[in-house]
Amino acid sequence: MTKTITFFVLISFYSLVSSCSRQQENQSVKAKEEITKAEKDFETMAAEKGIAEAFWFFADSNAVIKRGDDSIIRGKEAIRNFYAAAYFKTASVKWSPDFVDASEDGSMGYTFGQYVWQSKDSSGKINEAQGVFHTVWKKQDDGNWKYVWD
């Protein structure tokens, strides 16, 4: 009788652990899909509404960005102010993640990939810069994704 009870307890425990593992895997897969969509929506907004608006809209309230001379800009409003500079009004940016991953519980994730900046100088000449981006994403209480690091 004791062996039978032990067997059922072990089977029940295995089933519970296996079920939790599948749920976490599903949360991670869903989060990766949502983050990929957020990246695309972010890029689309930058093209349609401007860089400052997109970087503000997709920023978590405590977001941090590192730019040019290793300067750190903290918070949504500071990020918007940074991108309000005249340079960004004539600039455009395109990017696409080469890699997307998410935590098992689906609450955080990150991406990296290639970007291309284009801007016009005062003579109308287009300048281009390319590089690699890395973004850390956090799922918000409302289910939307915002970046916390870019």
Image (cartoon, rainbow, N blue to C red):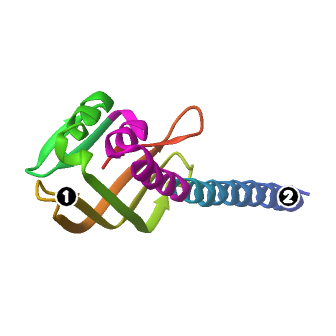
Residue where numbered disc 2 is placed: 8
Q: Quadrant of the N terminus?
A: bottom right
Q: Is residue 51 above or below residue 101?
A: above
State the image coordinates of residue 67 (x, y, percent, origin top left): 17, 49
- Report crowding for label 1: few under 14, some 14 to 19, many 20 or more residues within 10 A (C-alpha): some
Question: Dividing the picture into quarters, in which one does residue 17 lie?
Answer: bottom right
Question: Dividing the picture into quarters, in which one does residue 95 lie?
Answer: bottom left
Q: Which residue is at 52% across, 36% downward?
A: 140
Q: Which residue is at 25% across, 45% downward?
A: 89
Say whether residue 53 is magenta: yes
Q: Is residue 45 above or below residue 25?
A: above
Q: Secondary structure at mark 1?
A: strand
Residue where numbered disc 1 is placed: 120
Frontmost residue, 76 versus 45: 45
Q: Secondary structure at mark 2?
A: helix
For residue 62, the mark is none
Q: Earlier in the sequence, mark 1 or mark 2?
A: 2
